[in-house]
Amino acid sequence: MSFLFCLPAIRHVDEGEQIILSGCGPKRVIQGPKTFCVGCCISKQHQQGITLSETEYVKTVDSLTGAIQVVRGPRLYFLDTKERMVDHGKKNAIQLGPTAYLIVSHEKTGQVRQIIGPTLFVPGPYDRVEETLEAIPLKHFEYIRIMNKQTGKVRVEKGQNLIYLDPMEKILDAGSNQGVKSAINIDEHTAVLVRNTHTGQLRLETTQQLYIPAAHEEVEEVRKKILLEDHETIIIKDKDGCFHFKHGGKPMPQKQPRKKVSPQTAKSQKEKLIQFQEFQDSDELTHQMLEDEYERAFFLPPYCELVKLQWSSTSGGITKSRKNQVWKIDRRPRYLNYQFMCRTCDNVELILELTFFWQVTDVKTMIEFTQDPKGDICQHARSIVIERVSRVTLEKFMQEFNQLIKQYVLETDDSFYRDRGCIVHSVEVLSYHCKDQETERTLQAIIKETTDRLNRLQQVQSENEVKLYTMKGDIEQEKLHGELLKIRHSHHVAEATMEGEAEADQIKNYLDGLEGIDMETKLQMWNTLRKLDSLSTLSKGNSNMYFTPSDVNLSIETFGNPRKNEASNDTVRSRHAPSHGTSGSTTAFEGRKDK
């Protein structure tokens, strides 16, 4: 008989480790550091401890009871024999910044709560993180509309603030900017059309402010003030479908001062006004705005709309099917080009381009008959011109096309334009050409020949005008030259007269000064002085002058010397400068001796 003995083994467990012993009896856990003996029939399972930092946690479940617990660091955690880890081991805690927050739900109760940062969040055993969100920052001029999903109640959050949504709340009108909207700046030229969601009524908010709608209000439209110039008119249709007209050009009526009321009366009036405030304010405001026909700066009242007319569009003179929307009607005269085809009585197809100078004079009459006065004018004129041009030949049309068109369009007894509140001041033909190419070439040749003839006539006329102006210039020049000669002659005569009068006065004064002498002696003395003056003047020059003895009154006498007497018989010459003549000229005077 033999026996088998099992000796116990000695084992050592390091720090941070544990051994789970299982065999006969319950399981045992031995945590290190430790040395122990293990029987041969005992199974051993080595397991590391779980090291958790401050930001880590682990979720475990009891295998017998199913209870879940969360173990949070910092620590070294060893699982019990009945525990096991769930959710794939240890996890990091959720770190939330200053604007972050979590939506967490409880798996047992179903309750949902917020976890707002900044914090380090470790979920509980039955917590489930639904989503991580960022708070919505609002500036001082921004707002957001939030609705509770359970009650349907709407609230408005205004800036400056950080908005954290509750789990049962959602943002209304969420768009690219997370539903954040800017407040509306209401000023002199901006108003807001607001609808009350409780009563469904509209009101126009015109009080100058930074407007943020209340929870029960919705902004339907931001309206700009309509400004009319002197020549503009608009048409407004009210809630009953009636037309109202607003014209520029007249000053706005002055507002009447408000009457002072007692505090008791004001209180009672305020109480009555609160009862039907929204509907009455809107109705009265609409009535006041539409009452003044010549108010040129105003907001469009609630329940009213602008009447937009569809006017025909003309491009290059051709009317197209496309329409232009017109809501400001210009009452000034304007030009309108229109192109169409007609046919003369000699079967020549012409393409006419007309220009109308027309004007809207009565908007009330116009809206009763048409919403397209431009198209009506073009079509009516087209029908008249086609009918009348078909009665004339091409030759007559070419000679009198402007007169014919004016006669057809303007001089007919037709109330068509007056019935539409319009007036056509003038109409002219801008151009016309034949539709057929061959006929058009012939027409262009005729026009070219006529144009060349007119050019030649104009050239001849221009040349004649140049010659005429040249002759007129010569005539004027001769006239001026004759007047110049007359003036010079008169000046010479005046100078000679003055010199003669001065000379006569000098002679008279001299003769009157010689008393006791006869007139003949006075004259001889005067002549002698004049000759001396002449000789004195001539001696100062470079000229040579010859005098005879008679000119100088020279006498030679003989006193008994024959040789001298013979020499005196020679011709006596005297050289002096002449009184007249040019420099260098010589005048000879010869005289005989007196015995």
Image (spheres, grey):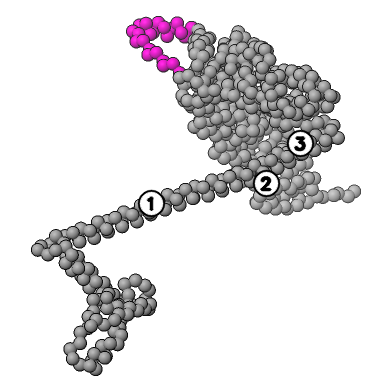
Picture disc at residue 225: none
* Residue named by callout 1: 487
As drawn, 245 above or below 568: above
Of residues 136 and 444, the one nearer the viewer is 444
Task: Tell me the kind of residue under disc 3.
Answer: Ile
As drawn, 527 above or below 330: below
Say if mark 2 contacts mark 1, CB within 8 Å: no
**Magenta-highlighted residues:** 252-275
Q: Earlier in the sequence, mark 3 or mark 2?
A: 2
- Quick one: label 2, few (<14), some, or many (20+) residues within 10 Å? some
User: Which numbered disc, 2 or 1, marks the residue closer to the eye?
Assistant: 1
Task: Using the rendered image of the protein, determine whether residue 488 is visible from the camera's viewpoint.
Answer: yes
**Magenta highlight on residue 255:** yes
Q: Earlier in the sequence, mark 2 or mark 1?
A: 2
Picture disc at residue 447: 3
The image quadrant that residue 87 belongs to is top right
